[in-house]
Image (cartoon, rainbow, N blue to C red):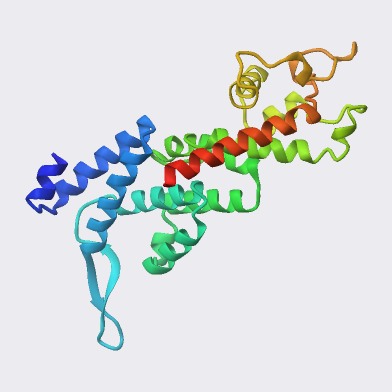
Amino acid sequence: MRQDLTIQRIESDFTCEVYETFARIAIEKGDLDEFNRCQDRLWSLYHQHLSEERDWSGERKPNGKCKLNGQRMEFLGYRILSLVLSHKHAELDATLLRLRLTPQEWSDEHVVHALAVRHAIGTRNYYRLFCLSEDAAPTMGAYLMDQVMARERVIALRIMCGAYRDYRDGLTRNGPSLLRVMRQLQFRSPRDVDEFLAEYVFKSDTVPATAFYPSNTTESGDENKILRAEVLVPRLDKALTEFQQLDAEGQA
């Protein structure tokens, strides 16, 4: 269908609807390549069909309103979000500068959420970031954020472990508790933390016992276990390197 629309050079409300539908399906299925193709075509449609008005000098300029009946602001939010999550900050700045959004557009919920995500990543406020991915994301934003949440959680956990300055001596109980990790990284239970560590950090079915300090007799429950920072840090560094290689391959 999209090929037919392109060959016949049909640029209408129906064209927008087709590409927007395919883009949403791609987001839900985690197909970022397909989403980016749809997004590029949509952005071209939105840009080509912006209405214009004359400014004080008589020059005609786009007024930010699209003649096509598409969901421009929703997909602007996705575009900002995808650039933020891909760490393409220079391209994002250029995009926002070129668009010259109106005050009403700046206050759109999709744009507000995407820029809040940008601020959370820029300030390394990972607690806020994970809250934005769970509850505050409008429409399909949560699906888009899910694609990189594992990477961002690895980064956040590496920062948490690195905060224990004496973790290398292995003599003191230096490391975050499972409960702290669960709360800061917005996991629902200690089991979710274990599954995350097993899949992305230790690359195994279970987390080895050496990842934790021996439990005190006064402590009870998984949430009171203390992670060994000296064990986690090298594995987290390796996981981050692998994520960076995947990101580089995806952008190639």
- Which of the two residues, 91 or 17, is positioned nearer the viewer here? 91
Toward the right, the furthest residue is 171
Q: Quadrant of residue 162?
A: top right
In the displayed structure, 8 sits above or below 224; it is: below
Q: Is residue 33 left or right of residue 16?
A: right
Across and down, in percent, residue 196 comes to 61, 24
| Rendered residue at 76%/21% (across/down) | 211
Identify which residue is drawn at 37% across, 66% down.
99
The percent coordinates of residue 89 (x first, y second) are 51, 57
Residue at 25% from the left image edge and 38% from the top image edge: 22
**Would residue 184 appear left or right of 107 to someone viewing this image?**
right
Q: Position of residue 181 (x, y in %)?
A: 71, 30
Residue 194: quadrant of the picture: top right
Q: Is residue 7 visible?
A: yes
x%, y% of residue 219?
85, 15
Q: Quadrant of the N terminus?
A: top left
Towards the viewer: 217 or 86: 86
Position above or below: 5 against 30: below
Q: Is residue 132 visible?
A: no
Query: Which residue appears at 74% of the width and 38% of the height?
Result: 160
